[in-house]
Image (spheres, helix red, strand yellow):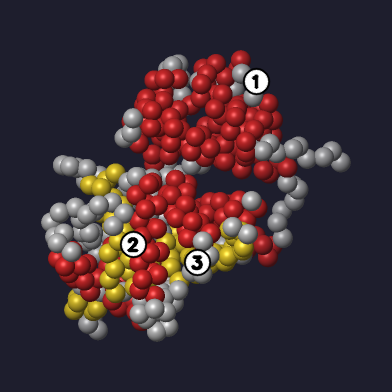
Amino acid sequence: MPSSPHVPEHGAVLAEVRKVRRAGVVRLRALDVPALTGIARELPRGDGESPGGPVEKVLRLAVSRMGGGTLQTAAEYSLGLAQGTRDWPAADRRRRAAQVYGVSVERFRKHHELMVLGQVAEQVVQLGAPAGATRTAPPPAAADRMPAAHRERAVRVHHRTVPVTVHVHSVDLLRDIDVVVSPSNTYFALPAPYKSSVSATLRRAGAHRDPVGGLVDDTIDDELQGWTARHGAPGRAAQPGTVAATSAGALTGQGIRRIYHVAVAVPRPETNDYDVQPADITRGVARVFALLAEESARYDPPLRSVCLPLLGAGRGGLPPLESFAALWAAVEAELARGADWDIHFVVRRHARADLLERLLGREEDR
């Protein structure tokens, strides 16, 4: 029986994706891209072929699996896959991709482009993975098993191993975690409780209601407004990265003891949009740990566990990879100095949990 083809490493695929970005798909047939060609060879043939051949088909399929949003749109423009951009010069494609994120071309080149192309490469490698795997159906028990809603990883950080838990469900289903972190705008104005964001969900779940569901006390919003009044900030924006603490309201019945609201979203004037900078996320999470250290001993038992969502990855528009990188920079620094906090992350979709597991796995392997 012939051996299964080798699946290229992510780095090799990324190098070829960057080569395509510079040349554009209109010149794809002239490029030497053996890793992409090898993966294309393993894909089943469809009814039609992409204009650039099998390699373009691989790239289009990979980009289509990126989940939409700014990340996928920027990838389409970067590679010339967006309608009408096949023959655009590389500089024009980069400029349009930068506009997707609302940043300068130079900032996009330095901070966003490698992340975007890296995610394309990640999807390409996943497309190639079945080619290197045993072509047998999974056992029935594995095929029928539901994905785990709580995933535990042992992560290597600064010569020690620490447990990290990833929860895959709505934030209001968390149980027995001392501090839950909630993203906020710089005005600490919570969204309406009927909305679907993390902060709206926590506001809704933390409210006290009568037996028929009528609102008795909007606890978390009331306490947050009280915090801004005490700190002289009502009606004006706080500095990005500021952290405000409230109780968990009705969520105390689930073992949640505190909500730390982190100001990371800066409203754009006269729009409904926000800007989120990764550096503000890192700064805000570092302040979360500083406040946790300050408050911990005031409680019996002391506060010890903290759960973080992917700050800025919703309305803030950050790709999940970029949000996690900004979060992890602060988490890793805190753990590296010997802190003994119990670290949790919460996401709603298994695809994002898979991404976090892969990223945490890389930390484990370092």
In the image, what residue occupies the spot 67% across and 62% down? 142
Asked whether the beta carbons under mark 3 and mark 2 sit within 8 Å of each other, the answer is no
Task: Inspect this view and state whether residue 303 appears.
Answer: yes
Q: Identify the mark nearer the N-term, 2 or 1.
A: 1
Q: Is residue 306 above or below residue 3?
A: below
Quarter of the image for residue 247 reads bottom left
Q: Which residue is mark 1?
A: 32
Residue 139: x and y, percent? 72, 60
Q: Nearer the viewer, residue 356 or 111?
A: 111
Q: Which mark is nearer the camera, 3 or 2? A: 3
Looking at the picture, which amino acid does disc 1 mark?
Asp
In the image, what residue occupies the spot 48% across and 38% down? 115
Q: Identify the mark nearer the N-term, 3 or 2.
A: 2
Residue 102: x and y, percent? 31, 35
Looking at the picture, which amino acid does disc 3 mark?
Ala
Q: Which residue is mark 3?
A: 339
Q: CA distance from mark 3 to mark 2?
A: 21 Å
Q: Which residue is mark 2?
A: 182
